[in-house]
Image (spheres, helix red, strand yellow):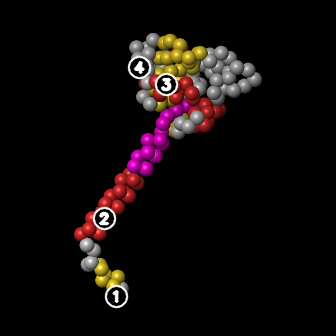
Amino acid sequence: MYTHGDVRTIASPRSRGLFRALATAALAALVGLIGIQAAKAADMVVYKTPTCGCCDKWIEHMEQAGFTVDARDLQNLNPIKAQLGIAGKLQSCHTATVGGYVVEGHVPADVVQRLLDEQPAIHGIAVPGMPMGSPGMEGPYTERYNVLAIGRDGRVEIYERR
């Protein structure tokens, strides 16, 4: 029995059940929204140095393509590159992880999306160095470059030509 001023109400078992069902549904919806936001909070983690402007431009490129990015500034990227298995000849100025893959350097967003859509059995993809005209390295001219597939065994082959 509930009392509100001079009015007394007796909640029936049916109305209490309805209230519980609505409360449970509302809680489930809230948890679902929080879960979705948590999943979207870090589609991609990017390791970069704090002063690299082209890394910031590449992150903007990825965000404009719909990725959510957690940028982590490090003074020395060598330990993370070693931990993630990026050989010296494949290295660039930043390293990212997304969907269980490693993405090294100025890889275009559409190629990263292709990687995620196709889910090949590889370790990741890389654009070694910093080719002019690649995302984040826009300038007065565009160089041709390759996006390389890094095999789980360390072998490298061309994934896409740009």
The Cα atoms of the two marked residues, 4 and 1, are separated by: 71 Å
Q: Earlier in the sequence, mark 4 or mark 2?
A: 2
Tag 2: amino acid: Leu
Q: Which residue does the numbered mark 3 point to in the structure image?
A: 115
Q: Residue 121's quadrant in the figure?
A: top left
List the residue tagged with mark 1.
6
Across and down, in percent, residue 60 comes to 61, 36
Residue 77 appears in the figure? no
Give the total number of marks visible in the rendering.
Answer: 4
Q: Position of residue 70 (x, y in %)?
A: 51, 38
Residue type marked 3: Leu
Residue located at (33% from left, 58% from top): 24
Q: Callout 2: helix, strand or loop? A: helix
Which mark is nearer the camera, 3 or 1?
Answer: 1
Q: Which residues are magenta?
A: 32-52
> Badge 3: few (under 14), some or many (20 or more) residues near its Cα, within 10 Å?
many
Q: Is residue 119 magenta?
A: no
146 vs 81: above or below:
above
